[in-house]
């Protein structure tokens, strides 16, 4: 068999794909091993990538790259400081209020919620929370509990450098962010120089679409979450719910999942309102419902269309799966890499679908035509200039 024999070509193609597969496995293994070291670099790279468009805009106005990076870095630092100065004391007061209200929540759960559940299900739930029963369970399993506690303490004693690592990461992230923003365009150029010249157009297109998809999600969805959280927090605080700020922030943080943020927030707010007044204050409950209704309407008709639109391409379910899978495989580093990898995978799948619809496997051996205003490709008979019936 000669070098140009089809069998040899197939074997060579298989070996190349095998090499790429082994290389990807090796990279994943290295990432898993170097997770704690890579975490500040990945976080700083994400921050640098988010700040690069603003740096480029300032640079196009005639300022130097270093000055533009310094201005954007100072702005990011100022925003972080404002968040810490304004939100942290407010959250601290809300947590103190929650801790002070815990006895009331305990009494409501044991005296109202659990008996209501028992009446409708027939299960004796309150008996399992009896103090004597809990003490007896502890006595029966104290050896196991002691073993677990010993293991936890042993792990903490062996992790004496954990706090030091956290401090080092906190110092490294802002320094690395500054350098990533300053040299971002240079890094992109160097990566582009490694791409084979006959594939540079495709690689540039995929990189641009990935950046737009990921940027649209991170920037747009973050602003939507911030807006909804502010509406819920301010609204519930104004109607008189003492834990309104904390509940509103939690509902806003999980609002990237459609309707989940509002559902969880309503349930938490209703329980907080019932415990706060020790009963049903229908005025307060109706006002809470009005707040969440306004939040949902503003999100659906103002925030999402204006800030997100159709630029994302990342389904919320895919985002949740990516974050959970990344955390399971690579810990916190995997959670940071989850969204960029999901954006890349989404763009590659769209590109693969486009190539598939243009291939002979999809269209067959006959020439094809594209319908006007549509991406659907229809088999075409060149002799009669008519579409071919696929059932024939």
Image (spheres, rainbow, N blue to C red):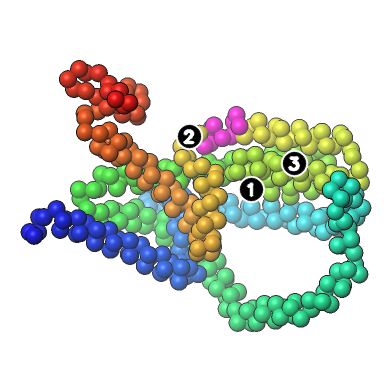
Q: Where does residue 392 sit, x and y in percent of width and height?
A: 29, 25
Q: Magenta part of the protein: which range?
A: 300-308
Q: From this view, report whether residue 158 is shown above or below residue 368.
A: below
The disc at residue 6 is none
Query: Seen in the image, is 145 located left or right of residue 40?
Result: right
Mark 3 to mark 1: distance in Å? 14 Å
Describe the element under mark 3 as helix, strand or loop: helix
**Residue at horizontal 50 percent and vertical 58 percent from the top:** 326
Q: Bin the neighbour count of mark 3 within 10 Å (Cα to Cα): few under 14, some 14-19, many 20 and up.
A: many
Q: Bin the neighbour count of mark 1 within 10 Å (Cα to Cα): few under 14, some 14-19, many 20 and up.
A: some
Describe the element under mark 1 as helix, strand or loop: helix
Tell me whether the residue at label 3 lies in contact with that at label 1, contact meaning CB atoms closer than 8 angstroms: no
**Residue at horizontal 25 percent and vertical 34 percent from the top:** 364
Q: Where does residue 204 sit, x and y in percent of width and height?
A: 30, 46
Q: Where does residue 185 sit, x and y in percent of width and height?
A: 34, 52
Query: Seen in the image, is 3 located left or right of residue 181?
Result: left
Where is residue 12, by image quadrant? Answer: bottom left
Where is residue 238, by image quadrant? Answer: top right
The disc at residue 310 is 2
Query: Seen in the image, is 280 located left or right of residue 35?
Result: right
In the rendered structure, does residue 83 fall within the stretch colored magenta? no
Residue holding disc 1? 253
Q: Where does residue 97 sit, x and y in percent of width and height?
A: 82, 55
What kind of secondary structure does the magenta stretch mostly adopt? helix
Tell me whether the residue at label 2 lies in contact with that at label 3, contact meaning CB atoms closer than 8 angstroms: no
Name the residue nearer the viewer: 64 or 14.
14
Residue holding disc 3? 266
Query: Seen in the image, is 390 located left or right of residue 333?
Result: left
């Amino acid at each position: 068999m000669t070098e140009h024999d089809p069998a040899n070509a197939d074997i060579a193609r298989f070996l190349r794909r095998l090499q790429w597969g082994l290389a990807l496995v090796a990279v994943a293994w290295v990432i898993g091993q170097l997770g704690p070291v890579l975490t500040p670099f990945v976080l700083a790279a994400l921050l640098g990538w988010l700040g690069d468009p603003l740096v480029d805009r300032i640079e196009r106005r005639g300022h130097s790259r270093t000055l533009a990076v310094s201005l954007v870095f100072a702005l990011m630092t100022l925003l972080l400081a404002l968040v810490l100065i304004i939100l942290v004391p407010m959250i601290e007061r809300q947590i103190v209020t929650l801790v002070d209200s815990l006895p009331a929540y305990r009494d409501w759960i044991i005296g109202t919620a659990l008996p209501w559940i028992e009446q409708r299900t027939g299960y004796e739930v309150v008996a399992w929370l009896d103090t004597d029963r809990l003490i007896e369970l502890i006595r029966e399993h104290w050896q196991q509990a002691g073993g677990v506690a010993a293991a936890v303490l042993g792990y903490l004693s062996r992790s004496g450098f954990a706090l030091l690592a956290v401090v080092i990461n906190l110092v490294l992230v802002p320094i690395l962010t500054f350098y990533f923003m300053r040299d971002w365009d240079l890094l992109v150029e160097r990566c582009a120089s490694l791409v084979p010249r006959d594939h540079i157009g495709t690689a540039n297109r995929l990189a641009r679409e990935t950046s737009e998809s990921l940027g649209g999600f991170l920037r747009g969805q973050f602003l939507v979450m911030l807006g909804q959280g502010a509406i819920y927090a301010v609204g519930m605080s104004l109607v008189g719910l003492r834990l309104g700020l904390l509940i509103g922030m939690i509902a806003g943080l999980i609002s990237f999942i459609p309707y989940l943020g509002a559902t969880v927030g309503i349930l938490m707010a209703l329980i907080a309102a019932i415990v706060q007044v020790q009963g049903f204050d229908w005025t307060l409950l109706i006002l809470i419902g009005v707040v969440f209704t306004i939040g949902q309407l503003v999100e659906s008709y103002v925030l999402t269309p204006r800030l997100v639109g159709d630029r994302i391409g990342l389904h919320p379910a895919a985002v949740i799966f990516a974050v959970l899978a990344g955390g399971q495989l690579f810990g916190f580093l995997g959670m940071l890499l989850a969204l960029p990898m999901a954006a890349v995978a989404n763009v590659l799948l769209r590109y693969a679908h486009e190539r598939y619809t243009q291939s002979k496997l999809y269209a067959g051996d006959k020439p094809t035509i594209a319908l006007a205003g549509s991406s659907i490709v229809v088999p075409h008979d060149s002799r009669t200039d008519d579409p071919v019936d696929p059932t024939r």
